[in-house]
Amino acid sequence: MGTSQSSSGSPSGVPMVPPWVPDLPLPPSSAEGAPPDATPEPGDATPPAPSPTEPRQPIPMAPARRFLGANRNLGDYARSGDGASMRRGLGQYVKKGYGGSSTATRRMGGTAQTAQALYSALSGGQGNAATATGGPLDPALTDGRSANEVMDAVVEAVRPVDGTQDAEASRTSIKDALSDVLNQFPDADLLNLQPEQRELAVERFVAGDVFRRIDLDIGRTIREKAPNAATGLGRLKEVREYVRETVSASFRRLRETGQRLAAGRITQIVQSAIRETFQVFEGYVE
């Protein structure tokens, strides 16, 4: 599935959000009533007011066997392929494993931050530091390279290796997202994507990273409980596609309320989409 092997389980008594994850302010808990994007007219010196954020809460400590319910349901799903068991497992993963969608969203703070860097790197233009002369994506350095080499260069520029599983997962998610863009837009210029193409890249990156977090935490259960290796991989693919559909629907709902990806607001919008996704999952056990 393009991810590193799932961990053997999360220890208890440690913060649910590791210290290396950027602890970003959470967006409102619902898109309802959230202010739409406000693009100032030329010459307008008054920037749009920032959206409200939730007060910071202490990061909870992980209880013992916090993924027990998720693993039980996903084990049933691995054996039977029952979609209801999968959804309950995802719900238990968020509700019990992370204590709810708020903490689960904070766990994905690195994803939101990386999404901002990815959007910027793919934007092109004179103001893009990554593609400026001497930058990591300087066209003089990438000219003549294959699409695969350009994607690798973007990955290195956006999410360098830092020794964490989070970085490894995000690097794979970035490359998969860029591949998806090229599959849909074969003539796309990866270093100067059109708005629709950038949105797709960010959306697919976020979906990939959310899935890989789930896989790293509890994917091992699906691999071990499935009748055979091929079935296990098939079940994981189904989970990945389900996560992608849910993330896509979350972005779509945000767009319908006027919240679109735009420079300077990527982190906030991505966090809102992640939170909506986790709220959907959490709802499966209510």
Image (tube, rainbow, N blue to C red):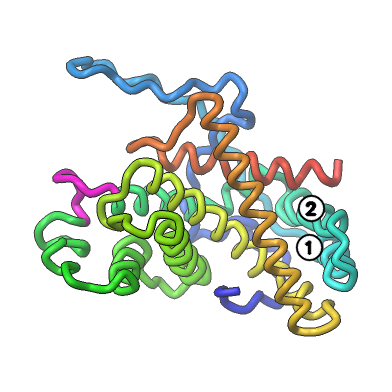
Q: Residue 206's x, y, as percent? A: 52, 53
- Name the amino acid type tagged 2: Lys
Q: Residue 254's x, y, as percent? A: 55, 32
**Residue in the image at 21% along x and 62% along y:** 137
Q: Locate the C terminus and report the quarter of the image it occupies.
A: top right
Q: Locate the N terminus and report the quarter of the image it occupies.
A: bottom right
The label on residue 52 is none
C-beta proximity under 8 Å, tags 2 and 1: yes
Query: What predominant SS class does the magenta segment belong to?
Result: loop
Q: Is residue 163 magenta?
A: no
Disc 2: which residue: 96
Q: Is residue 59 left or right of residue 281?
A: left
Name which quarter of the figure residue 272 lies in: top right
**Residue in the image at 29% along x and 63% along y:** 157
**Residue in the image at 34% along x and 60% along y:** 158
Q: Is residue 230 left or right of residue 187?
A: right
Disc 1: which residue: 67
Q: Is residue 128 magenta?
A: yes
Q: Is residue 196 left or right of residue 32?
A: left
Name which quarter of the figure residue 75 lies in: bottom right
- Name the amino acid type tagged 1: Phe
Is 51 rendered above or below residue 104? above
Q: CA distance from mark 2 to mark 1?
A: 7 Å
Is 105 rendered above or below residue 133? above
The magenta region covers: 123-130
At mark 1, the secondary structure is loop
Q: Residue 278's x, y, as percent? A: 68, 46
Is 178 rendered above or below residue 235? above
Is 208 rendered above or below residue 116? below
